[in-house]
Image: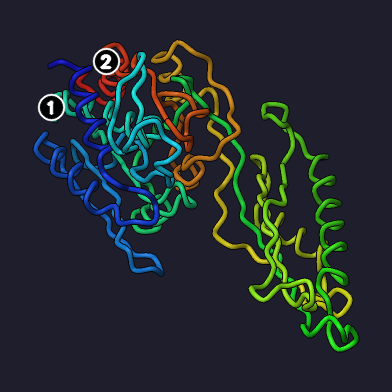
Amino acid sequence: MNSEKDVVGLTRRLVGFHSVSNVSSKEIADFISNMLDSAGFSVEQQSYRLSDGIEKVNVIAQKGTGMAKLALSGHIDTVPFDEKEWRNRNPLDLVERDGRFFGRGACDMKGFLAVAMVAGMRIAAHELSRPFALVFTSDEEVGCIGARKLIEAKGKIADMFVIGEPTGFQPFILHKGYMFVRISMRGKGGHSSEPAKGRNVIERALPMVIERVNEFREALQNITDNRLKPVYPTLNIGKLTMSRNAAKNIIAEECTLDLDMRPIPGQDVDEIFDALRRHVAPDGVINGISVEVKLMRKPTLPFETHPDAQIVRETVLMTGQEATSTSFNTEGGIFNHAGSESVICGLGSIDQAHQPDEFIDARFFKEDVVRRYEDLIRRMCGNQ
C-alpha cells in the first residue's frame, strides 16, 4: 500500500465535497461510510436536521463490538470560502505547490480524516482485542452541534479519543470553553425631531451596558490558570447591530451586542452567565430601556485531560512531543464530559485553518505519520 498516494488521493476526494456548515453533509458522510464499510468497519450514521431543515450526518465506524477503547475523531464540515481570495480557481480542488497541499479543509481537517481512515483500514478486525472506532461529526465549525447530538443520543462513545484538529502533531490536553452571549436592548423609536416621544437605546443604555461588560471582563482577569495563554477567562465584544430602520434621523429603537466568552477549566459556565446577566441588567431595564442578556447556544465546555492519563502518555509517545494547552476550542470538552478522556492531536497548523489558500505541509501525508497513528491503534486495541 502506498500510504502517501492513498492519503493524498483520499484527501483530494474529501476536499472535493462541498461540506461548508450551511449545507447538507449527507453526500460526504455517505462516501466515508461506504468506504469504511467496504474496509470491514461496522458503520452507523446519525442523521439530524436543524431549524433550516438541512440534513446533517455524523458517522460512527467501528471494528469490534462493545465500547470502543480508542476513537480517532474529526469533523467533516468546513468554514465558508470566497473563491476570489484563493490562488486556486476552485478551493475544492486539492492542489500541490512547493511542498504544500492547498484546498478548503486540507488542514482543518480533511487531511487528518484521510490519515485516520487509511491507518484504520490497514488493521483487520481479527487483529484487535479491543474495539477501535472512527467518529466523524458535522457542524463543529458552528458550535460542535454534531458532537452534542451524538452524545445526547448515545452517551459515551469511546474510552479515549484522539481528536485531529490542527496541532502540528503536538498533543493538547487543555483549553478554554466557549460561550456566545447576546445582549439585546429595546427602547422606543420615532422621528428625531421629537426626541421626547421616544427612548433612544444608544443614549440611554448602550454606554452603561458596555461599561458594565468591561467591568465584568476586568473581574474575570482575577481568575487565572498559568497553564493557559492568556491565563484568565476572556470576553470580547465582537459585534454591534442596529435595527433595520436605523438612520441618523430616527430615534434608535433597538441595538444588540454579541459577546464571545471563553471560561477556563474549573469554571461553571452557568454561574458565569448568571453573574454576567446580573451585573449587566439585574432588573432587565436600564433607564427605561429593556435589556435582555441571552445565551445564544449551549456553551462548549472547557477541556482538560490529566497529564498522567493513558491516552496522554500514548500520544506523547506517538509524537515525541510534550502535552500542552491551546487557545482554540474543540469537541474535547463534549466527549470528556460524557466520560471519555481525550487528547487533541492532529496535522498541520491552526494558523492555516479558516484562511484563504488553506494548506497542509506534504510532510504530514508521509508514511511515517500514517504509521504512527496505526501503531497507536495497535498498541491500545491490538492483540498484544
Q: Amino acid at mark 2?
A: Arg
Label 2 sits on residue: 371
Q: Position of residue 25 (x, y in %)?
A: 29, 52
C-alpha span from label 2 to label 1: 15 Å
Q: Position of residue 345 (x, y in %)?
A: 44, 26
Q: Position of residue 141 (x, y in %)?
A: 46, 47
Name which residue lies at 19% across and 19% down. Answer: 5
Q: How many residues crowd around disc 1 within 10 Å: few (fewer than 14), some, or many (20 or more)?
A: some
Label 1 sits on residue: 124
> Which quadrant would the C terminus be assigned to in this image?
top left
Q: Quadrant of residue 149?
A: bottom left
Q: Tags 2 and 1 in contact by the CB under 8 Å rule? A: no
Name which residue lies at 52% across and 28% down. Answer: 351
Name which residue lies at 60% across and 33% down. Answer: 327
Q: Nearer the viewer, residue 177 or 23?
A: 23
Name which residue lies at 17% across and 28% down. Answer: 121
Which numbered disc, 2 or 1, marks the residue closer to the eye? 2
Q: Quadrant of residue 258?
A: bottom right
Q: Nearer the viewer, residue 383 or 197?
A: 197
Q: Is residue 41 above or below residue 52?
A: above
Q: Secondary structure at mark 1?
A: loop
Q: Is residue 121 left or right of residue 216?
A: left
Residue 315 bears which disc, if any? none
Q: Amino acid at mark 1?
A: Ala
Q: Position of residue 26 (x, y in %)?
A: 24, 54
> Which quadrant would the N terminus be assigned to in this image?
top left
Colour pattern of the rendering:
rainbow
Q: Secondary structure at mark 2?
A: helix
Which numbered disc, 2 or 1, marks the residue that appears first in the sequence? 1
The single residue placed furthest to the bottom in the displayed view is 197
Q: Is residue 130 above or below residue 55?
A: above
